[in-house]
Image: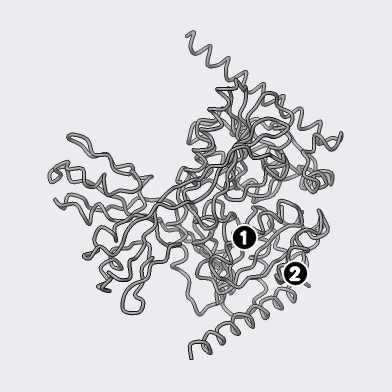
Amino acid sequence: MIISVASGKGGTGKTTISTSLALSIEEEPVQFIDCDVEEPNSFIFLKPNNLKKKSATVLVPEIDKNKCTFCGLCQEICEYNALVVLKDNVLVLPELCHSCGGCSLLCPEKAISEVDREVGTIEMGKRNNIEMVYGRLNIGEAMPVPLIKMVKKYIRKNNNVIIDAPPGTSCPVIEAVKDSDYCILVTEPTPFGLNDLKLAVGVMHELNKPFGVIINRHGMGDIGVEEYCREEKIEILMKVPFEKEIAVAYSKGIPLIELYPEYKRKFQNILNMIVNIVEKKANSKIMQER
Amino acid sequence: MKQIVIISGKGGTGKTFITSSIAAIAENKVISDCDVDAADLHLMLSPIIKEKHIFKSGKVAILNKELCTGCGKCINVCRFDAITPYENIVTIDPISCDGCGICARICPVGAIRMEEKVSGEWYISETKYGPMVHAKLNIAEENSGKLISVIRKKASEIAEMEKRDFIIIDGSPGIGCPVISSISGADCAIVVTEPTMSGLHDAERVIKTARHFGVSPCMIINKYDLNIEMSRKIEDYAQVENISVIGKIPFDEEVVEAITRGIPIVEYSKGEVVDNLYSIWGRVLDILKIKDEGIEKDAIK
């Protein structure tokens, strides 16, 4: 089963929740997939051993100038303006390329081949029963989505999989959570938290995903988030109190359930609840198909 | 006219609370919220929308079911796994579709056409602190970078026309496309961080990104008293990297109170945080002045 942890607003506690959720699973193997490739942080808390690094590459066009007739078709095809055809040259702007492969496929002279370009690294490690995979986008790279896809290739579906998603509501988040069975949205009880939670709930509806909310720093701010969840009949899975000790532990890279071991039970309960919800949904789907 | 962008790498370090206060302190400016993905600045500045524009960007493949023969050629060329077999023909998932249009080009029966997408809206608004240009990217959309370029261009036009001295830009978390679009060409990037291991790690990456694009960074440590030792580490890092730490803001419940009431804290309280924010704006002005003098000196040379 794949559970992803997301939020509209950044810094609400995604990594706090996802790492403790993974650590609460005992004995069974867990895969922890950090899809926040722009700013991966979970390794700070999970401290994996035996780190292995791999270069992550995408395909970009390379022009064989001996074959090219500078007809301009590739420039016309490219929706991303990554190719500029001049009188006797073709400029490739690799950072604009989305690797759709159209130019090399359709070049009438077969003058375009595809070559690897590094956009980041994939890092892997282990801690006890947790296998960790995370991506790290190279500085200056604009597009995280191809790297998120590559990181997700390591997912083995019948495992327990926890995904730490990036913040926001646009393409990187969608890519991170779209194959999940369930999504946990982490928010904080402030007008910023509420505004961005509503956006994240919009993403859940768009993707038709079952989801629940965890309110972090409960006790600060106001009750807007709770009222909203009640009105919309959204399950509040847990409230983590607003406490200096928790914030200080976070600052040092100490996971929540190491600070307060009693949270292990709470996270296990949430996991059981999610398993039930997902199984119920799967069963009702089978019934419908019959 | 000077452009000042507020970024953080890590989310939730206090960008928007600081931007709203700088927007209230700075004189004669245009405000621009470039966190189009999860915009929050409007909650603090209560803009009144004067103009609304549709943002069209990118394309999506649309299937004509009558024409499709189910040959599957499109499935083989789609690199985004957006097309799958379905009821003897195919189906296209608009969320996975990247809009490259190759399927439409190779379809032997012309069953796929490309349609331009409406992916958001942008607004020109009035606030009591000056004009504001902001936007809303639709859920599950891409091209946030292009939308940011649109609103930054509009903010510049307004600043030129009304002879404004500053553009104050609220950026987004991360280091990718929206951040690159928000910082490019800015005169100064304020990196707001917090004294946590994640905060420092993420600030380092966004500082490298700013420098990669030729924008000089300075830093604010927000909630610095949460972990004094970590704050010191951040200051050490800043010193080694030759980055000015232009402010250290203590944790104060009044910040949350002001956010809850939707008011920039400089208008809500008279506490230490507010003194800090005024001195931060003073330091920004110094940095911009020094930078200008440097440019003049270079010109004389």
Residue linked to disc 2:
A238
Q: Mark 1 lies on which chain?
A: A
Q: Judging from the image, what secondary structure is the residue with disc 1 in?
A: helix
Colouring chosen for the image of the structure: one colour
Q: Mark 2 lies on which chain?
A: A
How far across and how far down the image is residue B158, in percent? 57, 27
Q: Which of A135 and A103 is in front in this view?
A: A103
How far across and how far down the image is residue B62, in percent? 36, 62
| Real-space Cα separation, disc 2 to disc 1, in angstroms | 17 Å
Residue linked to disc 1:
A200
Query: Measured along the vertical axis of the image, is residue A123 above or below residue B218?
Result: below
Looking at the rendered structure, whether the residues under marks 2 and 1 are on a common chain is answered as yes
Specify the amino acid type for callout 2. Met
Residue ID at (22%, 65%): B109
Determine which quarter of the picture holds residue A169: bottom right
Residue ID at (36%, 60%): B61
Give the total number of marks visible in the rendering. Answer: 2
Crowding around mark 2 (Cα neighbors within 10 Å: few <14, some 14 to 19, many 20+) is some
How far across and how far down the image is residue B154, in percent? 53, 33
Q: In this view, does A145 lie to the left or right of A100?
A: right
How far across and how far down the image is residue A283, in percent? 56, 87
Q: Earlier in the sequence, mark 2 or mark 1?
A: 1
Q: Nearer the viewer, residue A279 or B247?
A: A279
Q: Is residue A147 left or right of residue A108?
A: right
